């Protein structure tokens, strides 16, 4: 294992590039597929799981190796890129304990450890690590802590621990309360999370084609309510994944309604002509205003996943976390 860096990293780089190219391709042109179909990405992820285990063994067997920082850096980056934090908790712990580790690796290693613990079902331990990580954070340097809080809350939401999710934001707000942006962000997220496990607020929605619909009309199906706008880069960045998610599960009862905060109907029409989003879009100003009030939306993107029973199941999940939540909701029986 002495040649870990040279023997393992070169094929790893090739695999990573291929994986990124493949992911981009399916995002641009979603194709309906069976969820059980084995994808090339899954093969890549499985290979990286093995490599992460090998990396942890290498560090354990070679605690004074000169390339430890290289191994740690690769493991941290890879686990975060592929969502394999749970497989990298041991490596992250060793990184935090190593005396020779570069200071620049400490923060991302702590993030991997925190998220990895949460994904492993050790949510309380993850929250403890998060709280400890806030001790040395300055109020004007909160971006990393905010990002970590969002990831941790996502895992708490998947576990149905919405009270714990609110606790994470409350802890961050109390610790960095001198930063008004952090305070506003956390308070808004806490208010939205209070809707979890409650009946989804009813709203009337008239889509771009003039069709009137309501939240309650989707009862028995899985509904994603997406608040977005054409001038919101994070909103637009999520659309390729949402299109693939819709292609995969629409036939099983998954629906999306997008509420656009754009002031101009012409802008939304022009965007839709290019994007061809396959779900209903709403841009009627008063309806969107009312919906924002009922769903406590102050910033976008804001997403609410409503289960078959008409209750809010999850708030502000995205990417693979959202996919997991949708798959879980689809397994529930119609009330």
Image (cartoon, grey):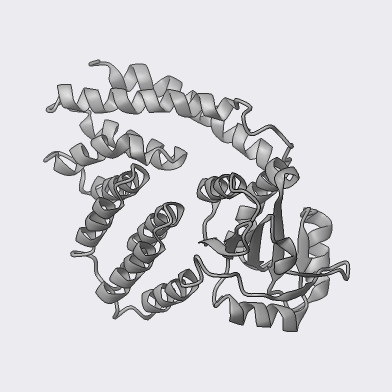
Q: Whole-percent x and y of residue 312?
A: 56, 64
Res 229 → quadrant: bottom right
Q: Whole-percent x and y of residue 196?
A: 49, 66
Along the line of sight, the residue nearer the viewer: 225 or 82: 225
Q: Quick check: 328 above or below 133? A: above
Question: What quarter of the picture does the N terminus occupy?
Answer: top left
Along the line of sight, the residue nearer the viewer: 45 or 20: 45
Question: Taking the image as drawn, is residue 9 in sight?
Answer: yes
For the point 37% across and 66% down, the residue is 163
Q: Whole-percent x and y of residue 4?
A: 29, 20
Position of 82 compared to 226: left or right?
A: left
Res 143 → quadrant: bottom left
For the point 75% across and 44% down, the residue is 251
Give the mark count.
0
Position of 33 compared to 234: left or right?
A: right
Question: Taking the image as drawn, is residue 142 in sight?
Answer: no
């Amino acid at each position: 294992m002495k040649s870990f860096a040279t023997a393992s990293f070169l094929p790893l780089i090739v695999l990573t590039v291929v994986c990124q190219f493949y992911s981009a391709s399916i995002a641009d042109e979603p194709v309906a597929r069976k969820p059980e179909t084995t994808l090339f990405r899954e093969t890549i992820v499985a290979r990286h799981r093995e490599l992460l285990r090998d990396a942890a063994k290498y560090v354990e067997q070679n605690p004074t190796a000169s390339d430890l920082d290289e191994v740690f850096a690769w493991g941290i980056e890879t686990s975060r890129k592929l969502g394999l934090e749970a497989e990298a908790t041991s490596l992250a712990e060793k990184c935090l304990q190593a005396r020779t580790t570069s200071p620049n690796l400490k923060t991302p290693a702590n993030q991997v450890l925190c998220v990895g613990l949460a994904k492993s079902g050790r949510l309380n331990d993850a929250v403890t690590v998060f709280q400890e990580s806030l001790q040395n954070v300055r109020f004007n340097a909160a971006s990393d802590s905010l990002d970590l809080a969002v990831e941790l809350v996502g895992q708490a939401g998947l576990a149905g621990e919405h009270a714990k999710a609110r606790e994470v934001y409350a802890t961050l707000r109390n610790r960095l309360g001198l930063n008004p942006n952090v305070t506003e962000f956390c308070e808004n997220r806490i208010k939205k999370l209070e809707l979890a496990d409650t009946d989804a607020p009813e709203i009337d929605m008239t889509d771009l084609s003039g069709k009137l619909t309501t939240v309650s009309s989707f009862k028995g199906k899985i509904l994603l309510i997406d608040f977005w706008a054409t001038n919101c880069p994070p909103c637009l960045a999520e659309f390729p994944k949402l299109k693939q998610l819709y292609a995969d599960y629409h036939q099983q009862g998954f629906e999306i309604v997008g509420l656009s905060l754009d002031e101009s109907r012409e802008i939304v029409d022009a965007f839709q002509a290019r994007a061809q989003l396959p779900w209903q879009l709403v841009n009627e100003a008063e309806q969107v205003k009312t919906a924002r009030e009922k769903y406590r939306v102050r910033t976008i993107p804001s997403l609410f996943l409503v289960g078959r029973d008409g209750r809010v199941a999850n708030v502000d999940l995205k990417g693979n976390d959202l996919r997991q939540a949708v798959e879980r909701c689809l397994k529930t029986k119609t009330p």
